[in-house]
Image: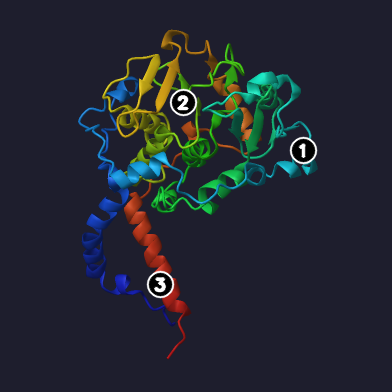
Amino acid sequence: MNQKPKSLFHREPIWLLIVVIVLIPFFHTLFSGTLDIEPWDDDDVFENYIGLRGVSTKLLVQPSLARQISNKILSPPIPIEKLTNSDEADKIVCPPGFNLIKDVQTLNDHAGEDNAIQRKIPKIVHMTSKSRCVSPAFGENIEKWKFHGYKFYFHDDEAVHQLLYERDWSPLVPHLVKVLNCITSMTAKVDIWRYLVIWEYGGIYSDIDSSPNIFNGTTILPDDDAYFVVEQLGIPSQYFFAASPSHPIMYFAVEWALHNISVRMNIRDNEAPKTTGPKALGMGFSWFTGKTYYSGAGVYNGEPPFADRSVKIEGEKERSNNIVVRETISRGPKLKLYQNQNMTHFMQDKEEEGLKCWIHLLAMYEEERVLAESLLPVP
């Protein structure tokens, strides 16, 4: 019986070893990038993760990259109504027992004179789920975020995919799509998406199971550049935040998220909280401020060249739900609701065995090369 010809790497394993050795410096440079990032110890106590032990927080951003972060050099953004397909939402028919979430595209009459005030953070709320059809419990919670005078956009998986993959991010984050290939968890992808959607459009982001408590449409002041609350671990919230467009902390959070994934020992276990989630945001906060510590609520200015940008943090960890309730729906019922909506909670979104990111990418490129060779005409 004829056997399928093996590729060069199968015939001569020594070639694979040579390629790996040659490409190690390349992948290190690719994933470390301009920021000269070093990985954290995964055993860090989560409550103290702002400490950045052993990691230099001095900004090593080149002048050209600093201008790139500060100024919009990307192509024009995808119109948000097109991104979320807002005009087609009315045509969606949800299964029985599910609520349809619609966008609010126009400011209503209750906005008053405040609409004329120049604001750093635009009056836009962004939320996401697998689809616009959600359980009544989530639906009721989502409706609480439709503040008077605010636009509201709901991003389904298709909208998330479009922003991540169809938007050209290469001038700002040239390695984005490469590292996304190492992300097997939708939770981790949505973490990166939330930073990019706020970078692109500005406004408020909230998880669908978080709800405003004393927070309302007037809590964020016109001069606020970015806004977080203190969560129960005493760190800036990642389940809820707001920022002006092109805020550097969003850029740094993306870079750290991508770096953390790139050095992950097992890409099938993205472990979002320690890679793309709160840890990446905390690293971004530390790089933005240039501080190796976090002292709670207050206004933090950026380190040059971002001294004209700032972050406001309000609240206290002992009463972390006072401003925004992190989990309106408790963990047990929420997991069942996720299952009903064909979603996976981040605590369940992992597998035991897998590869390092750069090895996974090498395997992908080898498969593509072998496929390309098979498509060549036979001499």
What percent of the width, then of the height, locates residue 341? 65, 36
In this orientation, does residue 262 appear?
yes
Residue receiving disc 3: 370
Q: Residue at x 42, y 12 (%)?
A: 317
322 to 103, vertically: above or below: above
Q: For the residue carrying disc 2, how many other residues have a C-alpha within 10 Å: few (<14), some (14-19), or many (20+)?
A: many
Residue 202 versus residue 9: which sits nearer the camera?
A: 202
Q: Residue under circle 2?
A: 226
Q: Which residue is mark 1?
A: 95
Residue furthest top as drawn:
318
Q: CA distance from mark 1 to mark 3?
A: 44 Å
Q: Amino acid at mark 3?
A: Val
Element carrying mark 2: strand
Question: Considering the image in quadrants, where does the C terminus appear?
Answer: bottom left
Nearer the observer, 88 or 249: 249
Task: Please report whichever mark, 1 or 3, sits nearer to the chain's N-terminal start.
Answer: 1
Name the residue: 69% across, 21% down: 111
Q: Residues within 10 Å of mark 3 (few under 14, many from 20)?
A: some
**Residue at the farthest bottom position:** 379
Q: Quadrant of the N terminus?
A: bottom left
Nearest to the eye among marks 2 and 3: give it: 2
